[in-house]
Amino acid sequence: MNRRDFVRTLAMSTLGVLTTFNNRVYAKTYLTPDQAKRLIWSDLAMVQTNISLTEQQQKSIQRSSGIRVWSRNIRALKSSDNHWLIYDQVIGKHENIDIAVGLTNEGKVKAVEVLVYRESYGHQVLHPKWLGQFVKKSASDRVKVDKNIVNISGATLSCVHLTDGVNRLTHTWNQVLQYI
Amino acid sequence: MFVKYIKVISLSLSLSLFPWLALEKANAGESLWVYAKGTDTMPAGELEFKLGTIARLGKNSGDYKFYDIRPELEYGISDKLTLSTELLLFSHDYSVDPDSGPGPMVDTQAKTGGSFDKTQVGGYEVSLKYNILSVYKDSLGLSLGAGYERRDRYRLDGTEIDQDSFLGTLYLQKNYLDDLLATTLTVKTEFERRKSGDWDDQSFVLEEEIALDLALGISYRVAPKWNLGIEFRHQSDYLNPQEFNEQGEFAYNPDLKPSNFDLFDIRLGSQHQNGNYFGPTVHYAEKDWWVTAGALWQVFGGGSKYADVRDNKNWDEHEKVHFGLTFGYEI
């Protein structure tokens, strides 16, 4: 077989193999912020309440949660009886994962929803049963993978960063939001 | 020379762009460096296609270009166990000065009119990688690898050989700053048994070699999708070739200690050569594909009195610079 034939054979074989297995799931937007609000808090009236943490608050949350606070800006909605909905991002393999976390006026997680998931692996964290593990958890629970949150093999990075994000936000409520 | 370069680049690009242009797009578990590898394994049932090309350019004299092209498929047998198979394509284009020797390239080009220019199928490799500790939730990521490699062509000069290698690899990875900063150490040991030449004309050589390939990488995600890093690579081998001496006896070199890797007798022989490289890497990942590039320069090298060592660098088995380019696609 000469070089040209070899390259042609190799390229066609590769294409054949790749075509056979071409059935993947892609990154996408699962919920808009409004849809997440309706899913978590139904028709509860909430107003935009964006917050900028002070440097001291940022350090305090980091200390108590053990999780780095990358941004001091919090984008949130708040109801008159002090329920919260926080739009946040956690680190993914290549890009961030957009999430919405509902917190009650007792600082407990009402629900966690994934808005945009940009990774090719780890979609298992979108399963309601996995996300349901966070419900009623608060800062005192200090959620952690393999401790009180079950890890999903093959989706470890997403599991760890989503859990860390919820842990950080419950401590944010504990340190800051409950006093607003 | 330029035409040859274009041909090799075209071969690499055509192999990599084929699936890219023809298929819908997915995402990747990727390599951030040229030689160093992380501890990640493929999720169960996932398949990835990679095309790695390393251009090894420049000796201490003459003109030397060698392209090591490796199409590879990786498959997740389970979330912790990955099977990979790769084809070794060697593209040589060299004409080194006779006073660079004695060395394999000088010997080979003497038989081919002063230069050597060929693209060949060099062999194949099959390997397994098993993840023991996750870099994302344990304090240190740890994976182990084992593999078999078959070569019919010598990487250095393109001559016909008969080589079987067994590979063992240790992967360590530690991440910092919420996994934005990745550090890794890959230690690969190869146990090679190589035969070349003809017994009848007493050109036959038997080499039992233990080779060490160590790579250290650091990479930081400077922006979403973008990683910048640096990489250090050490490669050395330990052997005492058996060949016909001036008395016509097939024997070891009395100046050197042989390597041995029989089941109950593993010995590290004399170091024949070593090369050490350092340079930057860049990595870009999209949802559906990724690419990693790097340039590693030989910073120092050495070897035994039988190796070609000049200016504190090794030239018989190592080059001035290695340019690496790898494309990856999830299938």
Image: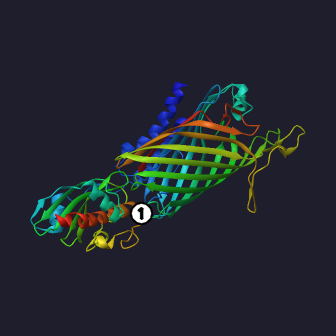
Asked whether B177 or B75 is in front, the reply is: B177
Q: Dot 1, how many residues are within 10 Å of its Cα: few (below 14), some (14-19), or many (20+)?
A: many
Q: Quadrant of residue B16?
A: top left
Q: Residue A121's x, y, as percent? A: 37, 58
| Image-based side of A176 in relation to B42, left or right | left
Whether A56 is drawn above or below A111: the answer is above
Give, as a three-letter code, the residue at label 1. Gly
Whether A149 is drawn above or below A35: the answer is below
Q: Residue B226's x, y, as percent? A: 38, 44
Residue A176 appears in the rendering: yes
Judged from this view, the residue extending furthest toward the front is: A56
Q: Residue B72's x, y, as percent? A: 51, 49
| Image-based side of A11 in relation to A70, left or right | right
Whether A72 is drawn above or below B33: the answer is below
Q: Quadrant of residue A132?
A: bottom left
Whether A38 is drawn above or below B62: the answer is below
**Point 49% across, 29% down: residue:** B6
Please give the chain letter of the residue carrying mark 1: A
Q: Quadrant of the N terminus of chain B?
A: top right
Look at mark 1 in the image and give the residue it sits on: A154
| Image-based side of A5 in relation to B253, left or right | left
| Image-based side of A12 in relation to B320, left or right | left
Disc 1 is placed on an element classified as loop
Residue A13 appears in the rendering: no
Q: Residue A3's x, y, as percent? A: 55, 36
